[in-house]
Image: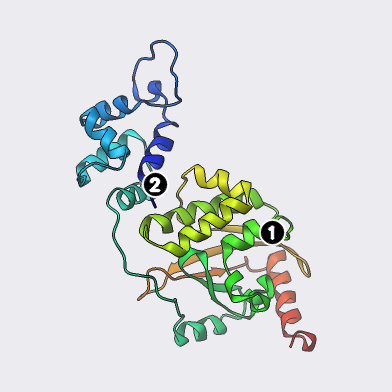
Amino acid sequence: MDGDLGDFLRSRRARIQPDDVGLPVHGRRRVPGLRREEVAQLAGVSVDYYIRLEQGRGPSVSDAVLDAIARVLRLDDTERGYLREVARPRRTSAPVRQRVRPGLQLLLDTIDKAPAFIFGRRMDVLAWNALGDAMSGYSRTEPAERNVMRQVFLSPEACELYPEWEAVAAETVAYLRLDAGRHPDDKQLASLVGELSLKSEHFRRLWADHLVKEKTYGVKRVLHPVVGELSLPYESLTVHGDQDQVLVVYTPEPGSPTAERIGLLASWAAAPARK
C-alpha cells in the first residue's frame, strides 16, 4: 500500500532516542526520536539516499542497507521481514478465492477436544470444527462477515467476548500489517482497511502505529456466554501448499477449569436443541 515504507520507518525511528544509540543531544528537538540524517549516519548511507528511501522513491535497496537500517532502528525479526517486504514490494496476481482442501476440513473435524480454525488472507475465517463453531458461531454468520478483523472491531459483543480486548485488537492489527506487506496490491485488503478506518477509531489509531507481529502461539481469554471464561493456549501452523492459510488450534491445559468448560461446551454443541 502506498506510503507504508516511509510511514513504517518514521514510526520506528520515532521510538529510538539519540542517547539510546550514543548520540549527543544539543538543544530542543522538534520531532521525537532520531532524525533522518542520524539514521543515515548510523546506518552508513548518505542522507540523500536515506531520505529518498523513506519517501519511497529510492532505487532497489540491498540487503546490506536494509540490515544496517534495521540494526539502527532495533527491529526484531518480524519487523526486519516486514521492512524487506515493503522496501521491495512484490507485484502479485489478482487474488483468487481461497478454498480449504477437503482433507484439511476432515482433519479439523477429527479434533474433538479443542476449538480449531483455518484462517486465510485478510484474517478471513475459512473453516472450523464443531467446537470452534460452538465458541464463535461462524456457521450462523454471513460469509462476508466471517473475518476476525470485522468481529473484533465491528461486532458490538467483541468487548464482552474478549476480556482483554485491547490486547486482542492490537495483535490482530499487527498481524494484518504483515499481510499487507506481503500483498501490497490486494484491493480487497485495502477496502477492508478503509472500511475499518471509517467505522472504528480504535482501528485507525492502531493501524497508524505500524506495529507488526506474528501470531505463532499465545493465550487467548474468551468469555463465552454459555460456559463462562476460557483461558486458551493456542498454536498456529502454516498450511503446507498454501502459505496464506494458517491452522490454529486452541488447546486447554488438561485438568484445568477451561478444559472442564470445553467439555461442557462440547456437550452443549452436541445437544439436540443445537441441531
Query: What percent of the width, then of the height, locates residue 134?
Result: 69, 75
Q: Position of residue 256 (x, y in %)?
A: 69, 65
Quick one: SS at disc 2? helix
Q: Is residue 91 left or right of residue 266?
A: left
Residue sitting at the far top? 27
> Which residue is pictured at 45% across the width and 67% down the height?
121
Instruction: Determine the image quadrant of residue 218.
Output: bottom right
| Residue 53: assigned label | none
Q: Judge whether 240 appears above or below 163 on screen.
A: below
The residue lying toward the viewer, choosing from 206 and 108, is 206
Q: Quadrant of the C terminus?
A: bottom right
Give percent across and percent down for residue 231. 66, 60
Which residue corresponds to the image point at 43% horizontal and 31% vertical from the top-left? Answer: 14
Identify which residue is drawn at 63% across, 68% down. 254
Mark 2 or mark 1, which has the lower sequence index? Answer: 2
Q: Which residue is mark 1?
A: 158
Measure the alpha-carbon separation of dots 2 and 1. Answer: 28 Å
Q: Amino acid at mark 1?
A: Ala
Report the residue at 70% width, 54% height from top: 163
Residue type, label 2: Asp
Estimate the x, y position of residue 230 in percent, counting from the top left: 69, 63
Q: Secondary structure at mark 1?
A: helix
In which quarter of the view is residue 61 placed? Answer: top left
Q: Is residue 232 visible?
A: no
Eyeballing the image, is 211 above or below 96? above
Q: In this rendering, would 257 be left or right of 123? A: right
What is the crowding at mark 1: few (fewer than 14 residues within 10 Å), some, or many (at least 20)?
Answer: some
**Camera-side mark, 2 or 1:** 2
Does the rendering let one see residue 147?
A: yes
Q: Which residue is mark 2?
A: 4
